[in-house]
Image (cartoon, rainbow, N blue to C red):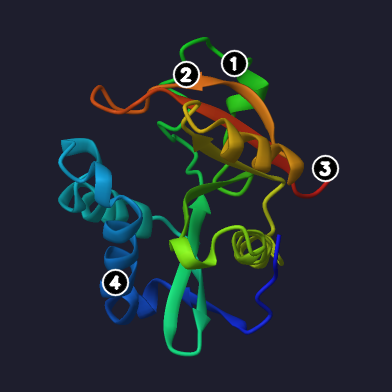
Amino acid sequence: MTTTPAVELRRYGVDQLDTIRPTLTEVYAEVYADRLSDPFFSVDRFEKRLEGHVSRPGWEVVMGYDADTPVGYAYASPLLERTRWWAGMLESLPEEMTDETGRRTLALFELMIRTPWRKTGTAHRIHEELLSGRPEERVTLMVEPTHPKVKALYETWGYEHIGDQQPFPDAPVYATMLRTLHAV
């Protein structure tokens, strides 16, 4: 793995969404270019999911830039008290694991890096910057099991596979992962 210390990380909140939305969409379209014909992965569906994600209190994004070129980003927000996040689990989890307060669990919705900056440590830097200073006890994410290298990478970052879910009827089945941020 080579590193790219020149990548500058910038944090944005929902109040800056109008400024960064085109970049979020552009990077998404590039990263998912080979899947955009699938309705679930279309740009239109991404934008609808983004709207839902940014409507939650505490949403923020960390974006990496090499000079003025956006290289990738990660965004997240806390799971709401009556979240649907756990509803798509293929096998139910214990209630104490899925009980949400609006402050307990951070959901990492997107982490994507443009091809030239992959395998450079940039994804990890963006990920860790997004998590730094967060008050939540834990963070959860979903990854397609058809990407075992990505899943294994998340495991090296401290995530544990806790089950599989299908969040929408037309979505793939995802491995759901969880990582502790702060001991309770």
Q: Which residue is mark 3?
A: 184
Secondary element type, mark 4: helix
Kind of residue sitting beneath label 1? Leu
Can you see residue 59? Answer: no
What percent of the width, then of the height, locates residue 1? 71, 59
Which of the marked residues, 4 or 2, is nearer the chain's N terminus? 4
Q: CA distance from mark 2 to mark 1?
A: 8 Å
Q: Residue at x 34, y 65 (%)?
A: 27
What percent of the width, then of the height, locates residue 17? 33, 74
Q: Is residue 138 above or below residue 5?
A: above
Q: Which residue is mark 4?
A: 21
Dot 1, how many residues are within 10 Å of its Cα: few (below 14), some (14-19), or many (20+)? few
Q: CA distance from mark 2 to mark 3?
A: 25 Å
Q: Are marks 2 and 1 in contact (CB under 8 Å)?
A: yes
Q: Which residue is mark 2?
A: 89
What percent of the width, then of the height, locates residue 159? 70, 38
Q: Is residue 150 left or right of residue 136?
A: left
Secondary element type, mark 3: loop
Q: CA distance from mark 4 to mark 2?
A: 30 Å
